Image (cartoon, rainbow, N blue to C red):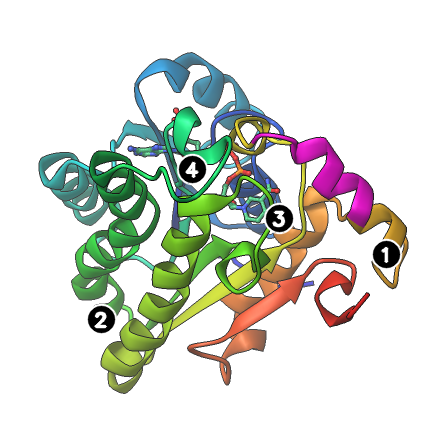
Amino acid sequence: MADFTDKVGLIVGVANHRSLAWAIAQATANAGAKLILTYQGRFEEHVGELAATLDPKPTVLPCDVTSDEQIAAVFERIEQDHGGLDFLVHGAAFAAREEITGGFLKTTREGFKQALDVSAYSLIALTRGAQPLMAKRGGGSVVTLTFLGSDRVFPNYNVMGVAKAALESSVRYLAADLGPENIRVNAISAGPVKTLAAAGIGGFSSILGVVREKAPLRRAIETSEVGDTAAFLLSHAGRGITGEVIMVDAGYHIIGM
Ligand code: NAP
C-alpha cells in the first residue's frame, strides 16, 4: 500500500459518498495523507460530514472552479496551513442537463462553453495554482478523471465527450510543461459508476448494462478501484508515469463488439 505520511493533498469534486473523488480521498487519507476537500455551494454540509469520518480530519473549503478568486483563496489557505502541496485530484465536471439528453447537433454555444470551462479548463487553472506549492516540495502529482466518451461515441454523452477530449489533451500539455519541475499529470479513465454526475446523463443505466455484459471482467467497476489506482499514481510508486490516461474500466475499452 502507498504511504502518504506527511503528504498534503487537495481533492476537488467530492459531492457525496458515491463520488469518485471521495474514493480517492479515502484511499489517500487511510494511507496517512493530510487532505483539503472542496465543495461547491450546496454540498458544504455533506462534504463536512464525510470529512469528519477521516483521520486526520481534512480541511473543508469552498471552491467553484469557474471562479479564479475562489481557486486563489484555496491555494493561499494551503500555503498558510501547510507551506506546500504534494498532490491534486481534479474530479469536477458539469454539463447542463439539456446538453446531455438527446442529439449532439443541438449543443448550444453557452452549453459548450460551460461544459468545457468546468470540466476541462478548471484542470489548467487548478494545476497553475498548485504548481508553486508543489515546486516547494520538489515536485508533485496531479490526477484528473475522464471517460471513454472522449474518444468513442456514447449515447447522450455529447458535449461532455468533447470536454473530456479537451481534458485528456490538457493532461498531455500540462505534463510536458511541468515535467521539468518533477510535477506529473495523469488521468484515470473510469468505467461508468452511478454517481450524481452520471445520473444527469440520459439513459446512463443502459451504458452500465452494456459494460456489465461486454467488459472482459463482466462487471462494472467499484469506486474503490479508482481510489486505489489514483493512490498509486499520486504516490512514489507512480513516479515514472506522466501524461498518461490509465483505463480503470474492467477492460471494456478493448472490446470491438
Ligand atoms: P459527482 O460525485 O457528481 O462529482 C462531480 C463533482 O463535480 C461534484 O462534486 C460537483 O459538485 C463538481 N462540480 C460541478 N461543477 C463544479 C464547479 N463549478 N466547481 C466545483 N465543482 C464542481 O460525480 P463523479 O461521477 O464522481 O464525477 C467525478 C469525475 O469523474 C467527473 O470528472 C466525471 O466526469 C468523471 N467520471 C465519472 C464517471 C462515472 O461514470 N461516474 C466515469 C468516468 C469519469 P456539485 O455536485 O456541487 O455541482
Calculate the distance from the C-alpha at mark 3 to the C-alpha at mark 1.
Answer: 28 Å
Tell me residue 47's x, y (percent). Answer: 46, 23
- Disc on res. 188: none
Q: Which residues are magenta?
A: 202-210
- Assess disc 2: are there few (<14), some (14-19) or many (≥20) residues with their C-alpha within 10 Å of its C-alpha: some
Q: Would the CB of label 2 be found within 8 Å of ligand 1?
A: no
Q: Does label 4 or label 2 sit earlier along the sequence?
A: 4
Q: Is 204 part of what is drawn in magenta?
A: yes
Residue that numbered label 2 is attached to: 135
Residue that numbered label 3 is attached to: 27
Tell me residue 120's x, y (percent). Answer: 31, 53
The residue drawn where x is 54% and y is 39% is 156
Calculate the distance from the C-alpha at mark 1 to the C-alpha at mark 4.
Answer: 29 Å
Tag 3 secondary structure: helix
Tag 1 secondary structure: helix
Q: Quadrant of residue 243?
A: bottom left
Q: Is residue 154 left or right of residue 48?
A: right
Tell me residue 100's x, y (percent). Answer: 47, 34
Q: Is residue 41 left or right of residue 144?
A: left
Residue that numbered label 1 is attached to: 214
- Assess disc 3: are there few (<14), some (14-19) or many (≥20) residues with their C-alpha within 10 Å of its C-alpha: many
The amino acid beneath tag 3 is: Ala
Q: Would residue 222 be visible to someone looking at this image?
A: yes
The residue drawn where x is 50% and y is 37% is 56
Q: Does label 1 or label 4 sit earlier along the sequence?
A: 4
Tag 2 secondary structure: helix
The residue drawn where x is 12% and y is 43% is 72
Q: Quadrant of the N terminus?
A: bottom right
